[in-house]
Image (cartoon, rainbow, N blue to C red):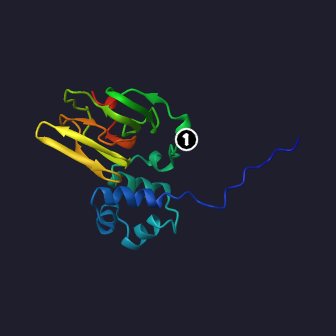
Amino acid sequence: MRPVHPVPANEGLAIGAKLRSVRQAQGLTIAQIAEAANLTKGYISRIERDETSPSVSTLLSICQVLSLTIGSLFEVPDNKVIPLHEAPFINMGGSGAVERLISPRHESRVQVLRSVLAPGASGGDDFYAINCDIEVIHVLDGRMDLLFPSGTVTLRALDTMTLAGREPHTWRNSNDGESRVIWTLIPAPWSRA
């Protein structure tokens, strides 16, 4: 048996977009990165557009400026498709709701739920709060009321509301038929200490 020699791939690794994203998230300009890494603005720009391949030492310098581990540039993203029929059923409390977890179970940065609310479905009579920073509620179809100590907000089909995750509230399906709702919790409630 003859050995098969490795052959490099024709396409290079696309790390430029990751570098640009981290730089922009930190509010840094190309000029600031170039100065701190002792490189030219044009060279940084070409790296961010994947028009050139930097040396390991150059890449290390840029990563140090960005407080980024060099290995994170080469991590394969954990992109996952969850078909609705495979999404696990969960129970977030309340009554008359069929709820599915449509984000990966292991994802701690966000939790996304899809609820089908029967007529009269409710989160209960008592106000509750969710241990997350942000809660986003999007009504796909139907209608629901969000009840707060200060009053009620009615969301209709395609309405979206963002609220502080620990704000006391409850909900009810105020529609004559089913309502479908997407709940997004950031971060996932179980990710907090």
Question: In terms of depth relative to the viewer, which is nearer, 17 or 6?
Answer: 17
Residue 84, percent across and down?
Answer: 52, 40
Residue 72, percent across and down?
Answer: 45, 46
Q: Quadrant of residue 182?
A: top left
Q: Secondary structure at mark 1?
A: loop
- Residue 170 lies, with reference to residue 157, above or below; the image says above
Residue 73, percent across and down?
Answer: 47, 50
Instruction: Give the residue at the far right of this rendering.
Output: 1
Give the tally of numbered discs. Answer: 1
Instruction: Give the residue at the far left of this rendering.
Output: 150
Question: In terms of depth relative to the viewer, which is nearer, 165 or 21?
Answer: 165
How many residues crowd mark 1 within 10 Å: few (<14), some (14–19), many (20+)?
Answer: few
Question: In terms of depth relative to the viewer, which is nearer, 129 or 70?
Answer: 129
Which residue does the image show at 37% across and 71% down from the upper left? 40
Which residue does the image show at 55% across and 35% down from the upper left? 86
Question: In terms of depth relative to the viewer, which is nearer, 14 or 139?
Answer: 139
Direction from residue 175 to residue 3 in the image, left or right = right
Instruction: Give the residue at the far front of this rendering.
Output: 176
Residue behind mark 1? 83
Direction from residue 152 to residue 54 in the image, left or right = right
- Residue 119 lies, with reference to residue 158, above or below; the image says above
Which residue does the image show at 49% across and 61% down from the upper left? 54
- Residue 77 lies, with reference to residue 65, above or below; the image says above
Direction from residue 97 to residue 11 in the image, left or right = right
Q: Quadrant of residue 85?
A: top right
**Amino acid beneath label 1:** Pro
Residue 185, percent across and down?
Answer: 32, 39
Q: Quadrant of residue 90?
A: top left
